[in-house]
Image: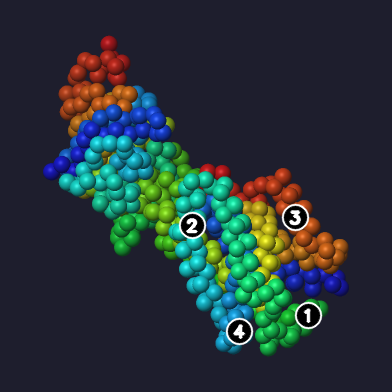
Amino acid sequence: MGILPQLILESLLLGTFYAFMSLGFSLMWGVLNIINLAYGTYIILGAYTAYTLYTGLGVDPLLSIPFSFLLGLSFGVLLQRVLIDRVMRLEPFMVLILTFGLDVFLSNLLNLIFRADIRSIDVPYAERSFVIGPVIVTEVKVLVFFLSLLLTGAVYVLLQKTWTGRSIRAVALDREGAQIVGISPGKVFAVTSGLGTGIAFSSGNLYGVLQGFTPFDGGMLTVKAFLVSIVGGLGRVESALAGGLFLGFLEVFTAFYLGEGWKFFASLLVMFLFLLIRPRGLLGGKYYGEV
Amino acid sequence: MRLLEVSDLEAGYGDVQVLRSVSLHVEEGEIVAIFGSNGSGKSTFLKVLIGTLKPWGGTVKFMERHVEDLPPEERVKLGIALAAEGRKLFLGMTVEENLLLGAWVKKEKAKENLERVYSYFPELYEKRRELAGDLSGGQQQMLSIGRALMSEPKLLMIDELSLGLAPAVVDRLANILTRIREEEGISMLIVEQEVSLALDISDRAYVFDLGEVVDEGRSEDLLRRDSIRKTYLSVL
């Protein structure tokens, strides 16, 4: 026993956050069929939004989540309509280059405004923690866990139970079938991009209270979202949850047993293995009918 | 009244022309069949009518209104629905979700229409929680037609009604379609390979060959015509 319960708990808490954080990436990939290389920087944009609201107006970063979401939503819809749609239609591969350029642009813009210093959102409850039997856990991590779970659940309900959600899944499954019943794929693309970007921004609030950040941390987060999508499989909320938990366990356990430096290497190795052996991911398959 | 009037329609893919000057009409309450050999442009024709393929030239009028430049969602709103070739179902979603999506342009009446479709196809009600991908071919065809009915169309277009289905299933489908026409007065445009079936359920029919209309007339007349009997019904 000893340290094991602590590690498992840490993995669960972190993994659930990773699941929510990656949901937007997986959604955009699954529905729009694009890999958004700027995704991690969207998360960082959310973190800076929360930071600015906290230091400027004293708004708690967990309370400003709806604001970040709406900001991301508008940004995502606009971006899709003005830029990505056109490129998608001409040459899907170019979307990779477009989002790569967008990533460089956005992170440098953040650097101009906030400079490269590590920022953190030091909420008053940051230092508090609980002791439950053999484990110790900080209040912040528990809050982030419950919010991630709640928001992931909300996205699940949106996708499963609402007209908007059904139209998103319909376009993902069969674009022509969706057109035939009168759904406009263009509108669904905009909504999906908005939802995905909104998720990224709001997960930035959570990321910002978990740890310090700089304008250039987005790339690493994109890789994590990528890994979660590969390992879990695409397109379903359950897949993101499976992938997120997998990454949580992997990071916590390699960091503890092999050292912090091995964490990223292990993640990339596992992603590589999944691509090689089980490219559909742990749960992948059914959601995307044509697979 | 003329529900659908197509004049001199031309269409194709890339450089390849598929439809050549096709003219066709459907009256209100009529069942019209299209038959012809593989590659004669029947499915392409329905794609142009629903709007997933842009025509090169010609006009499509629905209820006296030009629709050839409208996107599919506008046409569905006006009352055109398609049970497509390959069925284009959402295989990873449940039967009921597929039907609900058919009501996308008539959300407020989705519940009501769900009951209506279930009354025509009771097996869809029994399988409502199963994935569309797990249905048999006949049930998928019912789902495809049911989904199209969910938007309360004035014109129901069905591509390849009998393809891959057992004769008993085809008979049932034909009966249900006749019943729907009697009860609701919905017009239908049905693409069908099997000529005897096509002529049996329709009032009028068009014969397509290499993208052109080569023959047309009342179904009962076509059934008696020698050229039709020799070419399509293999009666010597």
> Which of the 4 image quarters holds residue A249?
bottom right
Callout 4, which amino acid? Tyr
Q: Earlier in the sequence, mark 3 or mark 2?
A: 2
* Residue under pointer 2: A83
Q: CA distance from mark 2 to mark 4?
A: 31 Å
In the rendered structure, the residue with mark 3 lies on which chain?
A
- The reply to whether label 3 and label 2 mark residues of one chain is yes
Residue A47 at least partly seen: no
Between residue A197 and residue A116, name the one nearer to us.
A116
* Residue under pointer 4: A54
**Exactly how many numbered labels are in the figure?**
4
CB of mark 1 within 8 Å of CB of mark 4? no
* Residue under pointer 1: A136
Callout 1, which amino acid? Ile
Seen in the picture, residue A94 relative to A137 is either above or below; the reply is above
Q: Earlier in the sequence, mark 3 or mark 1?
A: 1
The residue sitting at the left extreme is B1
Quadrant for the N terminus of chain A in the image: bottom right
- The reply to whether label 3 and label 1 mark residues of one chain is yes
Between residue A208 and residue B193, name the one nearer to us.
A208
Between residue B163 and residue A11, name the one nearer to us.
A11
Callout 3, which amino acid? Leu
Residue at the location (59% across, 72% down)? Answer: A46
* Residue under pointer 3: A268
- Under circle 4, the secondary element is helix
Picture coordinates of residue B44, whole percent (x, y): 35, 34
| In the displayed structure image, the side of residue A253 where residue B225 appears, left or right | left
Crowding at mark 4 (Cα within 10 Å: few <14, some 14-19, many 20+): some
